């Protein structure tokens, strides 16, 4: 059943819709969680849907596009209307047959086209997606808006449609895969513990295992399975502790640097295969490694690290010595930021390398290189309401400053009630209760429990 939307026909209506998106707490669901109301409050020629989902094993976006195509297109049309865009593009891989078929039916007669991507990594890198889909080159260190383009994740569009209907963000979709009984893609309340999410997929014994939150390339090791999922959690991957993928992810910083000094042979494969270098960014990881090893190049070479997207190609695919230029770049970025050193300006002569089309990393080959063939399985989407009775909603799960609690311990809240607001000054997002229950505690998270037996008081939105 299609939902009717009143498209913005005047500035006041446009502002009302932007405020609805803000009040609903919509942030980018597929990346760092940039507050969406800020991104849509702009003018652009093109709105691009990033449906590449280039990380191996994850299944969320492709299944949402296939199963909720009308809503995805509705969200795209809404953002086009708010931004004044004349063109909408849905970029997704050729292997997502069901999604392509469903979307083609919905875009007929509309100023929207589908752009078919090859199955390569990192097709979902925002800079790569924009270039592949439009031919426009986002300047180094800049955002797609610089080339008249706004990019949104698939689930973000669904949340925008809900926001217009006054339904806030309370749940997120994520794929649970790896060493689990049944890989699944689930919709769960934000704040559900990772251990409880894994239990739904039949994983109970963590002995000898480790969990990656996110994809195998850019995801992080989960230190505590009791920590909660957030608005941006898109995957949980369970792997044996001795799996080779985990070696570099668990390497201490001092050992990363020692190995780099001892083993880098300056083959420059890390540079030749770097997706950002191939788009003309001033980023040559082999020179950074040389500088770390021999002290050559100094500040300008170190500042190249700011251009690194930490996609992991150099670390998990390119380096023949098993080193991690990605980790070196991450360490340098932190140190340079601490010292107050800023990135260099975008190169005026930025141009795509002629070999860029031939140096894309095939996902099948990447899966083999990562030793993940046994885990490359379907993860069917389960649209169920799972009985979660306790959530811990982090105050900071988005780009910007932490949200400010507007509830107190002991208050009863219902799912969808606002529990935290953006700071008075600075970038931020609203947070909402993801279950019915009582606020138990407020620290860096708001803990809500559905269990009876706590002292309660009525929820008051003016508090």
Image (tube, rainbow, N blue to C red):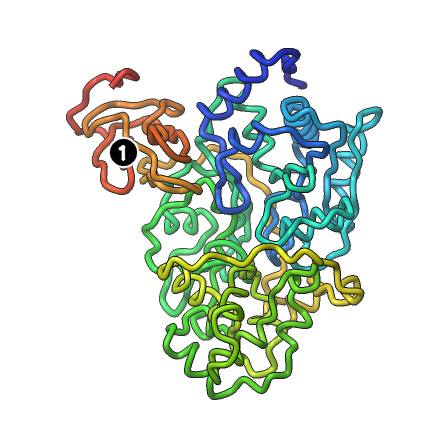
Q: Residues within 10 Å of mark 1 (few under 14, many from 20)?
A: many
Check the picture and name the quadrant holding the C terminus: top left
Which residue is at 51% across, 81% downward? 296
In the image, 374: left or right of 120? left
Q: Depth check: 29 or 195 in front?
A: 29
Residue 457 falls in which quadrant of the image? Answer: top left
- Return the x and y of residue 395 as percentages of the image width and height: 33, 38
- Return the x and y of residue 309 as percentages of the image width and height: 56, 58
Secondary element type, mark 1: strand
Q: Which residue is mark 1?
A: 449
In the image, 346: left or right of 279? left
Which residue is at 19% across, 30% downward? 409
Q: Depth check: 238 or 12 in front?
A: 12
In the image, 256: left or right of 45? left
- Return the x and y of residue 121 as percentages of the image width and height: 67, 60
Q: Depth check: 8 or 376 in front?
A: 8
- The number of discs equals 1
Which residue is at 66% across, 32% downward? 68
Which residue is at 39% across, 79% downward? 255
């Amino acid at each position: 059943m299609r939902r009717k939307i009143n498209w913005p026909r005047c500035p006041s209506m446009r502002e009302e819709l932007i405020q609805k998106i803000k009040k609903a707490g919509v942030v980018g669901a597929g990346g760092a969680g940039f507050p969406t109301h800020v991104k849509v409050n702009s003018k652009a020629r093109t709105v691009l849907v990033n449906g590449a989902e280039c990380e191996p094993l994850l299944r969320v976006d492709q299944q949402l596009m296939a199963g909720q195509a009308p809503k995805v297109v509705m969200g795209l049309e809404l953002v086009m209307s708010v931004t004044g865009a004349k063109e909408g593009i849905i970029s997704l891989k050729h292997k997502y047959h069901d999604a392509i078929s469903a979307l083609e039916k919905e875009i007929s007669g509309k100023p929207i086209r589908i752009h078919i991507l090859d199955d390569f990594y990192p097709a979902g890198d925002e800079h790569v997606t924009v270039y592949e889909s439009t031919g426009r080159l986002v300047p180094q260190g800049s955002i797609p808006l610089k080339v008249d383009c706004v990019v949104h994740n698939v689930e973000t569009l669904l949340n925008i449609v809900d926001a217009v209907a006054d339904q806030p963000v309370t749940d997120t979709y994520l794929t649970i895969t790896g060493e689990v009984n049944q890989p699944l893609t689930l919709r769960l309340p934000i704040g559900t513990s990772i251990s409880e999410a894994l239990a739904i997929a039949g994983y109970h014994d963590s002995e000898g295992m480790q969990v990656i939150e996110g994809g195998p390339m850019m995801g992080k090791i989960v230190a505590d399975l009791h920590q909660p999922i957030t608005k941006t959690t898109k995957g949980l991957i369970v792997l044996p502790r001795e799996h080779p993928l985990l070696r570099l992810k668990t390497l201490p910083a001092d050992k990363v640097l020692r190995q780099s000094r001892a083993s880098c042979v300056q083959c420059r494969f890390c540079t030749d295969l770097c997706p950002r270098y191939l788009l003309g960014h001033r980023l040559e990881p082999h020179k950074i490694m040389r500088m770390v090893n021999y002290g050559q190049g100094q500040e300008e070479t170190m500042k190249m690290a700011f251009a690194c997207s930490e996609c992991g190609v150099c670390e998990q695919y390119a380096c023949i010595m098993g080193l991690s230029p990605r980790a070196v770049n991450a360490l340098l970025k932190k140190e340079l930021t601490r010292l107050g050193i800023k990135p260099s300006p975008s190169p005026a002569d930025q141009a795509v390398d002629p070999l860029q089309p031939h140096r894309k990393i095939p996902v099948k080959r990447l899966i083999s290189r990562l030793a993940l063939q046994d885990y490359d399985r379907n993860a069917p989407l389960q649209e169920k309401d799972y009985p979660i009775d306790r959530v811990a909603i982090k105050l900071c799960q988005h780009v910007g400053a932490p949200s400010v609690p507007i509830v107190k311990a002991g208050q009863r809240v219902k799912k969808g009630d606002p529990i935290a607001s953006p700071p008075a000054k600075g970038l931020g997002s609203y947070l909402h209760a993801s279950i019915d229950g009582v606020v138990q505690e407020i620290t860096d998270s708001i803990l809500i429990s559905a269990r009876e037996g706590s002292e309660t008081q009525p929820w008051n939105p003016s508090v």
